[in-house]
Image (cartoon, rainbow, N blue to C red):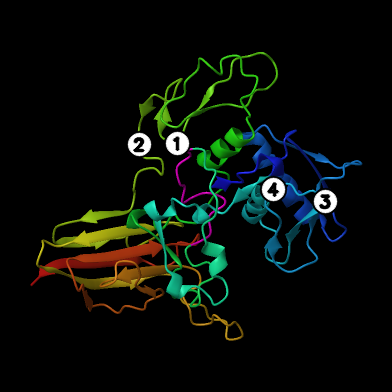
Amino acid sequence: MKALPNKGALWLDKVIPYEFHTSVNKSTGDTIRSAMDEWEKKTCLKFVPRTNQKQFLRFRTDAGGCFTFVGKKNMEGQDVNLGPGCEHLQITMHEIGHSLGFYHEHSRRDRSEVIKILWHNIEKGMASQFRPGNDNSKGVPYDVTSVMHYSPMSFSSHLFEKNTMVTLDPRLQTLIGRSRGITFRDAKLANKIYSCDDGCPNKGSMLCLNYGYLSPYEGNSKPCTCVCPPNTQGKKCEKITGDYYGSISCGGDINKEGIIQSPGYPSRKPNDSCTWQIKAPFGKKVQVTFEDFSFRPRMNKPANRYNGYCVYEHVEIRTSNMDEGDFYCGEDLPKGTQMVSSSNTFLILIRADNKGQGRGLKASIKFIS
């Protein structure tokens, strides 16, 4: 996540007045309050019902799309629109993030260290959604799971067939744009730009390690504590127990012949995404023979424009271009289907949904000349 470089566009008193337009029903109102609660839990910011304040957020649902301004605007009420399909908690947290002063994560200038934009796959007229801007990331590392990150197929000209963003480390591809809330790095940047540790009596003496940060000051003269990144421990976050994104529980790097199969094969669990990066010795190619392939079927809704596509989940297979491949789902690959890489690298990426439908996959790996 990256923030506005101009502090004047932040809510400097750390209080954000809001009101609901008459178009907001009870269910959406509850979702908005839940989203505001999530931001409050992890920052020093407070959302309060508007009384007579001139600058405030006005939530509404009477226009199409999900949008708002970035940061506080000098106007009497700025709209946060949550049109049809936008009334979900994740999207609402994302739009509130914009109003607090945050741009998209994937528009950071340092993104090329983590992701690659596939410009040729972007829908005509939508390239502006991916152009980098002025950064104010305050030293907070890039986060593919940020609540402000788009999904890998956002604005694809071939939706459910081609990605618009891929991670340089293929093991992170199945995480990209799959935020489950405000992440540690999202919260850290918000705390830094809003100086949430101002007033902490131990601000100058308590050094949080490994990218940890001081908790927001609660105004009670008590010392602030370190908020530690995932997979770190200790009062000062001094002990690293794993990677920020956690250990890879499915897939991995394969450099020898043998059999691979999805977890629990021939059954599946929801959200079991996997990445296998198969590498043969230099000068050889990878041959993969699928012994079984069974996932959630392609959409079967004739009236829908995406009927027949892998809408719900997909398995992406990259055999030549390691940036992109073809999408498969259902039982697209009959038993005995063989694929051969054009180099010594072969990628299989399962982007699973929350159903866990099908048996998964089982395949044999051989290295050939």
Q: Where does label 3 land, which residue?
A: 75
- Could you say where residue 243 lies in the image, as x and y percent from the top left? 36, 40
Mark 2: amino acid: Gly
Q: Quadrant of residue 256?
A: bottom left
Which circle's residue, 2 or 1, is located before the other in the chain?
Answer: 1
Mark 1: amino acid: Pro
Disc 3 residue crowd, few under 14, some 14–19, many 20+, Cα 10 Å: few
Query: Can the viewer see residue 263 in this picture?
Result: no
Q: Quadrant of the C terminus?
A: bottom left
Q: Measure the alpha-carbon separation of dots 4 and 2.
A: 35 Å
Query: Magenta segment range?
Result: 139-151
Is residue 142 magenta-colored?
Answer: yes
Q: Measure the alpha-carbon separation of dots 3 and 1.
A: 39 Å
Mark 3: amino acid: Met
Eye-nearest disc, 3 or 1: 3
Residue at the location (38% across, 74% down)?
328
The label shown at residue 71 is 4
Callout 2 touching callout 1 (CB < 8 Å): yes
Residue at the location (54% across, 80% down)?
306
Which circle's residue, 4 or 2, is located before the other in the chain?
Answer: 4
In the picture shown, does residue 150 fall above or below 314?
above
Which circle's residue, 2 or 3, is located before the other in the chain?
Answer: 3
Which circle's residue, 1 or 4, is located before the other in the chain?
Answer: 4
Q: Where does label 1 land, which residue?
A: 230
Residue placed most toward the observer, 251 or 130: 130
Residue at the location (26% across, 59% down)?
277
Which circle's residue, 3 or 1, is located before the other in the chain?
Answer: 3
The label shown at residue 244 is none
- Could you say where residue 321 lies in the image, as x and y percent from the top left? 29, 71
Most distant residue in the bottom direction: 302
The label shown at residue 242 is 2
Eye-nearest disc, 4 or 2: 4
